[in-house]
Amino acid sequence: MENAATAATAARTVPAVIVAIDGPSGTGKSSTSRAVAEQMGLSYLDTGAQYRAMTWWMVHNGVDVSDPAAVAAVVDKPEIVSGTDPSAPTITVDGVDVSGPIRTPEVTAKVSAVSAVPEVRARITGLQRALAAAAAQGIVVEGRDIGTTVLPDADLKVFLTASPEARAARRSGELKGADVHTTREALIKRDAADSTRKASPLAKAGDAVEVDTTELTLLQVIECVVTLVEEKRAAK
Ligand SMILES: Nc1ncnc2c1ncn2[C@@H]1O[C@H](COP(=O)(O)OP(=O)(O)OP(=O)(O)O)[C@@H](O)[C@H]1O
Ligand SMILES: Nc1ccn([C@H]2C[C@H](O)[C@@H](COP(=O)(O)O)O2)c(=O)n1
């Protein structure tokens, strides 16, 4: 009983904090956000996984993803559920675990087209805001438009960057020796599509802290963001 009371008091004294982490592909958003959330007892949401899950469903159901009207017509059909425990994040579509299938080259090649459709963004933004509002201790949400559109009142906004060469080297290492040049071109193409779409493009919020990770190790980036979150928490 005493322990429960102590825990309840501790939970009350640590203010919930909302952290938005945005940036182009391969800058370290997922790795950093997940680690920061784990270290600080926060929830974690990978919004790219939600757009990938929507894309996976479209492909799986034979929807022509190059036709925005066809995509918009079925946007409410899939039930997309994200688990926000940073030690074991999950993503399901209609009850099916899609954490593997959403990372295929086919989904990666099609996700920018699907995520550019305004009806897709409206639906997924609603899911994201509901999850952030439900996170009792706070949450780290990572993506492309979190600081600008999804959570414009976030306590802390971070925009991660890195040179295309560093990002391609990281990704090709992850993809077990995939050609760095091809990986670099694919990253640049996806970033261009994500940055130039009309609906909620990839952009740095005016009040975001920019961190160039090119010359930093992942541990250094995590440490940097943890310090920024601690400062925000202390000021609350
Ligand atoms: N500072 C860093 N130094 C070296 N490797 C890193 C660094 N940050 C991340 N990585 C590695 O780079 C790869 C891509 O990182 P991560 O998936 O976190 O990027 P991301 O920004 O979330 O990418 P995407 O938007 O494409 O999902 C991972 O293998 C990760 O371990
Ligand atoms: N907030 C977000 C998050 C992601 N997307 C789109 C654009 C990306 O190319 C794609 C996949 O994201 P990743 O898994 O690489 O982080 O999803 C977006 O439009 N908005």
Image (tube, rainbow, N blue to C red):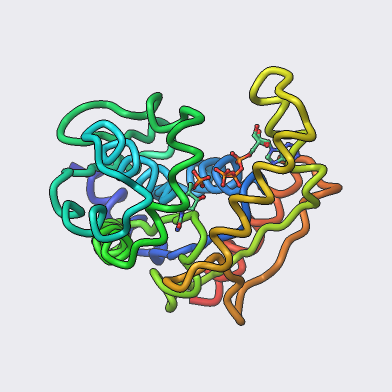
From the viewer's perspective, is residue 167 above or below residue 229? above
**Which residue is at the front of the view, 171 or 236?**
171
Quadrant of image for the N terminus: top left
Q: Position of residue 172 (x, y in %)?
A: 71, 28
Q: Total marks drawn? A: 0
Residue for point 49% across, 72% down: 155
Query: Left or right: 6 with respect to 170?
Result: left
Q: Position of residue 201 (x, y in %)?
A: 51, 68
Q: Quadrant of residue 165?
A: top right
Residue for point 30% across, 50% down: 6
Query: Left or right: 3 with respect to 32?
Result: left
Q: Hey, which residue is sitting farthest right in the picture?
A: 215
Does any portion of residue 134 appear in the rendered image? no
**Which residue is at the front of the view, 161 or 78?**
78
Q: Quadrant of residue 184?
A: top right
Q: Hey, which residue is sitting farthest top in the picture?
A: 176
Query: Left or right: 174 with respect to 11?
Result: right
**Which residue is at the front of the view, 206 or 57?**
57
Q: Quadrant of residue 115?
A: bottom left
Does any portion of residue 213 appear in the rendered image? yes
Residue for point 64% across, 50% down: 189
Q: Hey, which residue is sitting farthest bottom in the picture?
A: 206
Q: Position of residue 122 (x, y in %)?
A: 28, 66
